[in-house]
Amino acid sequence: MTLQQLLDGGNDWETLRTHDAGPQGALPITPEMLLQQPSGNLFGLSQNAGMGWDPARLRDPEYLILSTHGGLRAADGTPIALGFHTGHWEVGLLVAEAARTLRDRHAIPFAGACTDPCDGRTQGTAGMLDSLPYRNDAAMVLRRLMRSLPTRRGVIGIATCDKGLPAMMMALASSGEYPSVLVPGGVTLLPESGEDAGKVQTIGARYAQGQISLEAAAEMGCRACASPGGGCQFLGTAATSQVVGEALGLSLPHSALAPSGQQVWLRAAAQSAEAILRMTQLGIGTRDVLTDAAIRNAMVVHAAFGGSTNLLLHIPAIAHAAGLKRPSTEDWIAVNRSVPRLVDALPNGPVGYATVQVFLAGAVPEVMLHLRRAGLLDTSVRTVTGETLDANLDWWEQTERRRGMRQRLRDLDGIDADDVIFSPDGARARGLTSTVSFPVGNLAPEGSVIKSTSIDPTLIDADGVYRHTGPARVFLTEEDAIRAIKAGEVSHGDVMVMICGGPMGAGMQEVYQVTSALKNLPFCKHVAVLTDARFSGVSTGACIGHISPEALAGGPIGKVREGDTIHITVNRTTLNASVDLVGEGDETFPAEEGARRLAMRSLRDDLHPHPAMTNDTRLWAALVQASGGVWGGCVYDADAVITKLARGANAATKE
């Protein structure tokens, strides 16, 4: 193509205009408004008229709808430009449904968006280094958008997936006296034949090991996302975040995990618009919904679902954004020791039902009914319905919707809802145990986390304890680790030690590529993983993450050498767990001696941040470190950061 062909576009200037008639009518303003209101409010009315809103209705109350919508769809749903993932592909339909409802109720809807990335798309790539940092950036942008419509009466937030939904909850949590409602963006459907979106992410590793053919990989990869919208079919971070949003009281009852694109999903957006109008009438703000009791309820429901460990980062961040106390490690331990796991969902099992099947079984309100009977919830908390959680659960217990959903699950898939969501007695009879343990020890003095229910049951001793002792295989990048797995260089009994993956090393990357490969290779259930990075919510196996301090912050995990003997114990009944150095070469010793030797060692001289670490992520890591670190939720604590900067400036002045 020549320059002339590229740039010549015909005589389009011949139809160009410099003036237009403008909207007809007049602004509904009063002398008082002209005298007392800021110019921004008045110019806002001019812009609203300029965008085509009926001037006679410009005094209607204004509400903002924020979403993570991505991509561009034609009217018939076909793609014009793709989004990053299915989770935000259909979210614009929810925005439109909520907006139409507000318009029909004589309110003015505004819509804005801050789209989000996909952790599945960035697995094993440099894009993962931006994943968790994005959450804080997006929350900040969403809050700025909220404040940039100063005439808003409230905000509806619509989001679905791993980072966009936590970011949206952090933004809404800051709403204070303004009402806000969260609309979860739903889930995708299972393929009629094939694999779910979690398992299909392992086709590369399985093909490398001769487990599947090229043809099978291609066919299963094509079908895995069976419907065009919604988060993945497993109870990963996306689905768990939807569950937590409803458990906080920010979403309407039985809205989490609805199948994207279907009528029940659309209705939730319309009802959410009605709810925010009702909150305004009743004078209920977000601060009346998000309380310390609501945060604890969310932790309880998270434990009962057996949700993603990434919510250990997100729930504290939501609490911080709301000006509430961030839950401590001790709080998480206490909740997980007292709350039974009640849900059989992918990837935990024992059967592993898909998220849409959990939805049909009753999802959050059904689980909450069991928790209420067990006295584990504060049901006096207020929710976005305008009523208490107690009133919401009374409605759910008696509603025809509950009975109809359960019957639909039986008719469609032949599944009894009581086999998906158990009572505490039923869960005990099935052998379900609490989800999360927090190993400490000489390699994790500030703690770590493992989804103990995801350890292969055949590896659990008769006393309910997982024990593993093996040689350390040390990897400084995820790329090196996955290369070793594919090449068959990781052996039965090894302990893969993946370091330099924490905030300072790689933005606390998610290493699902490694854990999924291990799950789906025959011998690899006998391999344990230790890392200062984090795991996907769909990860399974003996995988210990969030190890603190991280290697690049001087943590003892950064002193482990190839061949060191490491011992791991996880008691799935008491939730006590430990991870320790217990040997060098042919010598073994107690954990106490391991701590002494680690104290004498220097950090490895090959520690380094990921080669693709950007300045954006380096700055995020520094702010997070100053704000309470991983166990503080990886937030930006403005007071803490400003205090430390001032301290540093004062010290520099004295020098």
Image: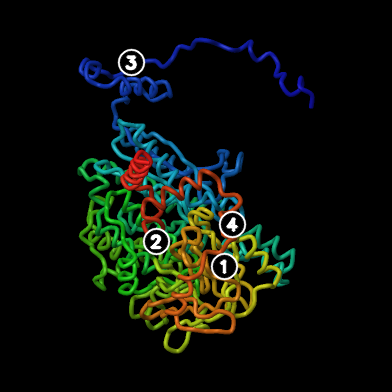
Q: Earlier in the sequence, mark 1 or mark 2?
A: 2
Q: Tell me the kind of residue under disc 3.
A: Ala
Classify 416 as above or below 250. below
On residue 550, the disc is none
Residue at mark 4 to residue at mark 2: CA–CA distance: 20 Å
Name the residue located 59 percent from the left edge and 80 percent from the top edge. 585
Residue at mark 3 to residue at mark 4: CA–CA distance: 54 Å
Colour style of the rendered protein structure: rainbow
391 or 644: nearer the eye? 644
**Residue 316 figure quarter:** bottom left
Q: Is residue 611 left or right of residue 230?
A: right
- The quarter of the image holding the C terminus is top left
Label 3 vs label 4, nearer the camera: 4
- The quarter of the image holding the N terminus is top right
Q: Tell me the kind of residue under disc 2.
A: Leu
The residue indicated by pointer 4 is 123
Q: Tell me the kind of residue under disc 1.
A: Thr
